[in-house]
Image (tube, grey):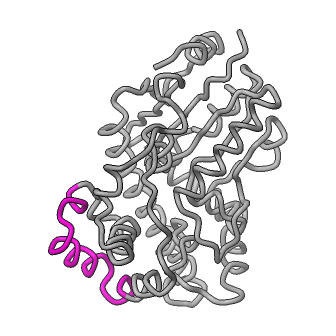
Amino acid sequence: MTQSDAPILIAGPTASGKSALALRLAALTNGCVINADALQVYDCWTVLSARPDASETAQAPHWLYGHVGKYESYSTGHWLRDVETCLHDARAQGLRPIIVGGTGLYFGALTRGLAPIPPVPDHIRSAGNTLRLETGKDGFLSDLEREDPETLAGLDANNPARLQRAWEVLRATGKGLSRWQADTPPPLVDPQQAVRLHLDADRDWLAERIGRRFDLMIEQGALEEVKAYIADGWDETLPSAQAIGAKELVAYLRQELDLTTAIDLSKTQTRQYAKRQRTWFRNRMREWTALDPQNDISDQELEKLASSFS
């Protein structure tokens, strides 16, 4: 097929087979794989975040995996700036950029632009962390309902991290997140000049894969990875601590849960996360090409997809 600079975007819920599809496309298009998963950026999680392993990264260049320290804050803005560098490097090296992951906000910022929101001061972030520890999502919900209902109406009310972000922006700037977003500049990637693929997985099929994958994670050393993470302390408010299964396995290591219960809870949390992802993608990616990961797709069909826009 003709080499193209047009990015290929692959979005989908956890465990839906995104990384395998990205590798196939990389082989067909002389591509590089660029991470769009908010947990796979952290260097502390290889197994628990399902990062591509050494055999996979040997097949094609992989960028933005494991390049952020566990204590670092890594925002969508950080990711977008890193992706801009990756796109420049891909063009310079004659590689087709394949951006793959399950973080919908990353893809939204990439294809719709990102508001120029000032950094949140440390004291406000600390106050947000304290409120989250004391009240969970309820404190953020209460304040946003009263002070910024416009932003709250567009948020997932079951996602404490997103609620905290909106709360912090409001506290730091006196301006709601939705108003900042209304002043968004043009996107880094024009969605009409990109191949946009959405893995739309069946719920039961995905649930079975999630269960098998978490069992495999335990076999591959997830517990040892969590032990290493908490060796210098455990702070559940850190962005890196939000890896699904981390809190449950920490509870097991502290003898607060038995292992079976910790694993079962981790699988439940993963299924719930996948449900939120599926809903988000279906609502916001209606113009993307939906693929059923249960169905085999030939190399010829993939080549045809990779050579067409929108």
Q: Out of 239 and 75, give the one closest to the viewer.
A: 75
Q: Quadrant of the C terminus?
A: top left
Q: Position of residue 69 (x, y in %)?
A: 70, 71
Q: Does residue 155 appear to the left or right of 61 in the view shown?
A: left
Q: Quadrant of the N terminus?
A: top right
Q: Does residue 244 appear to the left or right of 223 in the view shown?
A: left
Q: Out of 133 and 75, give the one closest to the viewer.
A: 75
Classify 19 as above or below 132. Answer: above
Give the magenta range: 131-153
Task: Place residue 87 in its image quadrant.
Answer: top right
Q: Out of 250 and 239, give the one closest to the viewer.
A: 239
Q: Position of residue 212 (x, y in %)?
A: 56, 52
Q: Out of 116 and 261, give the one closest to the viewer.
A: 116
Q: Does residue 124 appear to the left or right of 69 in the view shown?
A: left
Q: Does residue 103 appear to the left or right of 53 in the view shown?
A: left
What residue is drawn where x is 30% and y is 85%?
A: 135
Q: Position of residue 147 (x, y in %)?
A: 19, 73
Q: Position of residue 84 (x, y in %)?
A: 64, 43
